[in-house]
Amino acid sequence: MDLKFIKRNIFTFVKIISTVLITSAIGLESWNIYAVITNSHLPSSLNPIFWIERFAMTSHFIESIIAAFYASSRKKMPIKYATYTFFVGTIGLLELFDQQDDY
């Protein structure tokens, strides 16, 4: 088995799962905000899930800030890389760091 082939397949799988989970976390947090605004009560059993999704969103946000600064220092599009890294996570940073400079 080729190691690059395995790495590429694992990265693709993690990117898909990460994008789905971050999108779900955004939806879950939107539901929570809506419940607070309308004075609705959410089940208390969801509290651990809210903490996990907030931790994941915070860490992805920090990674996207790092990607934006790194991309801007390399004369690339920071918004594009920040958005991509926010949704795929650490793999987006690894891909950005592995790219060769074009100049």
Image: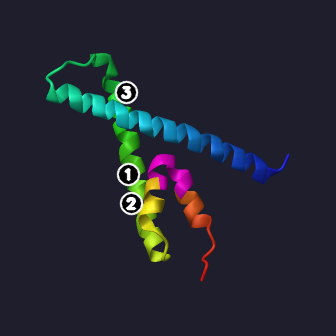
Determine whether, in the image, residue 16 is placed left or right of residue 77: right
Disc with the residue nearer the chain's start (1 vs 3): 3
Residue position for label 2: 65
Disc with the residue nearer the chain's start (3 vs 2): 3
**Is 100 located above or below residue 61 in the figure?**
below
Q: Give the x, y percent position of residue 84.
A: 49, 54
Residue 61 shows which numbered tag?
A: 1
Where is residue 46, by image quadrant? top left
**Is 37 located above or below residue 57 in the figure?**
above
Callout 2 secondary element: helix
For the record, the magenta segment spans 84-92
Residue type beneath disc 2:
Ile
Residue 49 shows which numbered tag?
A: 3
Q: Give the x, y percent position of residue 23.
A: 43, 38
Q: Do the residues labelled 2 and 1 touch (CB within 8 Å)?
A: yes
Q: Report the residue at 45% width, 76% height from top.
A: 73
